[in-house]
Amino acid sequence: MKTKFLPFLLLLIAFNSLSQNAPQLLSGTKKLFTANYEMDFETIISLSYPKMVDTIGIDVMLEKLDKCYQNEDYRLRYQLESVPFITHKIQKIGALSFCMITCRNPVRYFFEKKLTTEEATTKIAWLQETNHTKDVVFEPKRNSFNVKRNTTFLAVMDETTSGDWKFINLDDTNQAAAFQSLFDESVKKQLGINK
């Protein structure tokens, strides 16, 4: 009887811990999205996966976030204050827990210098490639581009996160590169994330 009860108990404990993590996961995701919306870079870093932050470096990460959102060419702004998140299945791989989170995340790029028709056409191609979307519309009167895109975050929980979900923005080139260097091929394969 005890041998039949033990696997059931372990399954119940595992299910209970994952179900308790779901609200925490959603709460952390909302905080991360709000920090991006408000351009609160320190909060973004505090919610980011610690090993990734160590790999990139806090100062470098702050500088890259700032340049991504505002530089001499353009200003990037999230258009929606909150969005519905699609959380995929929580996966346990070794001692780590992972969860992919996606959302529709329209953004706007405001260019500082008035763009010609040719420059706008070039920027459309660049924005399509950068944002992995074909849905880019130039608005000449606002000298801006409306970009309808999806964003993918990878939530990670391990011994470095103190039991909290921490995030990697897989759409950010630097964070995606850090993910590639931090995790082995078996993890990438199980998560379905290849280069």
Image: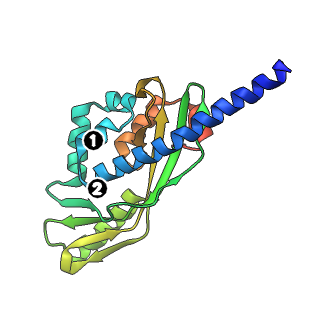
- Residue drawn 54% across the image and 29% down it: 96
- Residue drawn 43% across the image and 64% down it: 133
Q: Residue furthest front?
A: 1
Question: Where, quadrant-wise, is the N terminus in this rendering?
Answer: top right
- Residue drawn 54% across the image and 43% down it: 193
The answer to which of 120 and 133 lies nearer the viewer is 133
Q: Which residue is mark 2?
A: 37
Q: Which residue is mark 1?
A: 43
What SS does tag 1 mark? helix
- On the picture, is 165 further left or further right than 174? right
Q: Residue furthest right?
A: 1
Q: Position of residue 24 (x, y in %)?
A: 46, 41
Q: Position of residue 71 (x, y in %)?
A: 16, 54
Mark 1 or mark 2, which is nearer the start of the sequence? 2
Tell me the quarter of the picture where residue 72 sits. bottom left
Q: Position of residue 13 (x, y in %)?
A: 65, 30
Q: Disc 2 residue type?
A: Tyr
Marks 2/1: CA–CA distance: 11 Å
- Residue drawn 35% across the image and 38% down it: 47
The answer to which of 40 and 19 lies nearer the viewer is 19
